[in-house]
Image (cartoon, rainbow, N blue to C red):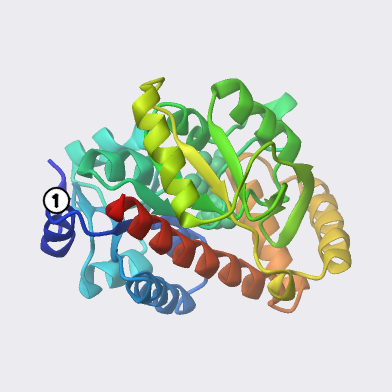
């Protein structure tokens, strides 16, 4: 049922490094036409680390692992691209729909294809209004049951960061900071919350992956939380001020449910003069490069 591109299939068969990339960030997380440029740029960054990129999406009901340029263009530009979490996959397949995959759907498809390392921007998590809405991303539950290594820059500060860390603990998902003892804050190098473990090199990450397999515990993920470099982060004061304003505006305008995240992200981009977008891209770029190096260490292990 999975359509794995020839390049990705050959790389996996030869035990060469492969990095899975999600597509929701392209279809729904970035403005056009910047989104297509970023999609191509991220694939190039993976190649520069000596790994093969495998961007994942569902096109006309076919879950695809590894997209060509034309297929990437469809993901970036088609209005009919849905946002697919893992629960949506059978529905999209059976109805022939097309959609970009979130972290949960990407992790599931990557693992089924035999791709062990996955790079993204930020994970979904627990929303601040959880007590009213019970809105917690399906990313967390899926990562508790999928053997994959996800390189991310933490979660966005528009979410409830400590609640998200607590849920990851409860669900039994391993979390390690990469060269930091602090959980990154997506736009910021430090969310203000600690992590229990720090890994210092791709080899060390790869050793943890081997230990996960050897221990044969529940099939859970490893989250490698990689901070955006301090020089490229959003100014923390600007971040705090605009985030507070955005949360107020959201409440004042009565924005709720699925509309909350796009509203807040758009507000941040508009009220930081694009600085939040620059920090966002710097974070994703760094994650993709690190994932390439981890995939190389894993392939050589
Ligand atoms: N965080 C970002 N940008 C994104 C997402 C998260 O900074 O585009 C996307 C990811 O694909 C993530 C998804 O898996 O949002 C989570 O959505 P939800 O909360 O609906 O599960
Ligand atoms: Mn959500």
Residue 295: quarter of image: bottom left
CB at disc 1 and ligand 1 closer than 8 Å: no
Count of number-bearing discs? 1
Residue 85 seen: no
Q: Going by the image, does 273 lie left or right of 95? A: right
**Which quarter of the figure has residue 297?**
bottom left
Above or below 46: residue 196? above
- Residue drawn where x is 33% and y is 45% of the image: 116
Dot 1: element: strand
Q: Residue at (18%, 36%) from the top-left corner? A: 94
**Residue 106 visible in this rendered orientation of the protein:** yes
Residue 234 sits in quarter: bottom right
Return the residue nearer the eye: 137 or 96: 137
Whether residue 217 is situated above or below residue 192 in the rendered picture: above
**Residue 147 placement (x, y as % from top left):** 37, 34
Q: Is residue 44 above or below residue 59?
A: below
Residue 291's place in the image compared with 74, above or below, is above
Closest to the observer, 124 or 166: 166
x, y percentage for residue 15?
Answer: 19, 54
- Crowd rating for badge 1 (residues with CA inside 10 Å; few <14, some 14–19, many 20+): some
Q: Position of residue 231 (x, y in %)?
A: 73, 75
Residue depicted at 63% across the width and 75% down the height: 278
> In the visual, does 208 lie left or right of 248?
left
Quadrant location of the N terminus in the rendered image: top left
Tell me the residue that label 1 is attached to.
Answer: 3
Q: Give residue 80's position: percent from left, percent from top.
A: 33, 58
């Amino acid at each position: 049922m999975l359509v794995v591109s020839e390049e990705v299939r050959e790389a996996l068969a030869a035990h060469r490094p492969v990095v899975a990339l999600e597509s929701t960030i392209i279809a729904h997380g970035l403005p056009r036409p910047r989104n297509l440029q970023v999609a191509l740029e991220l694939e190039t960054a993976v190649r520069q680390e000596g790994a093969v990129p495998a961007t994942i999406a569902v096109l006309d009901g076919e879950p695809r692992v590894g997209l060509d340029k034309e297929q990437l263009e469809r993901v970036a530009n088609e209005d009919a691209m849905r946002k697919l979490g893992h629960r949506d996959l059978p529905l999209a397949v059976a109805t022939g729909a097309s959609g970009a995959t979130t972290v949960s759907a990407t992790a599931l498809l990557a693992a089924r294809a035999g791709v062990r390392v996955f790079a993204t921007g930020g994970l979904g998590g627990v929303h601040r209004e959880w007590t009213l809405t019970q809105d917690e991303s399906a990313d967390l539950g899926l990562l508790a049951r999928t053997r994959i290594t996800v390189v991310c820059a933490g979660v966005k500060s528009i979410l409830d960061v400590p609640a998200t860390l607590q849920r990851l603990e409860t669900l039994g998902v391993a979390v390690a900071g990469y060269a930091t003892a602090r959980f990154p804050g997506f736009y910021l190098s430090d969310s203000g919350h600690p992590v229990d473990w720090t890994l210092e090199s791709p080899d060390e990450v790869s050793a943890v992956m081997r230990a996960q397999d050897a221990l044969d515990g529940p099939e859970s993920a490893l989250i490698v939380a990689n901070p955006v470099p301090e020089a490229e982060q959003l100014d923390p004061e600007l971040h705090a001020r605009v985030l507070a304003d955005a949360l107020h505006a959201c409440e004042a305008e009565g924005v709720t449910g699925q509309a909350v995240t796009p509203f807040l992200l758009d507000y941040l981009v508009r009220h930081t003069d694009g600085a939040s977008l620059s920090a966002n891209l710097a974070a994703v770029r760094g994650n993709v490069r690190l994932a390439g190096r981890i995939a190389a260490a894993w392939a050589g292990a």
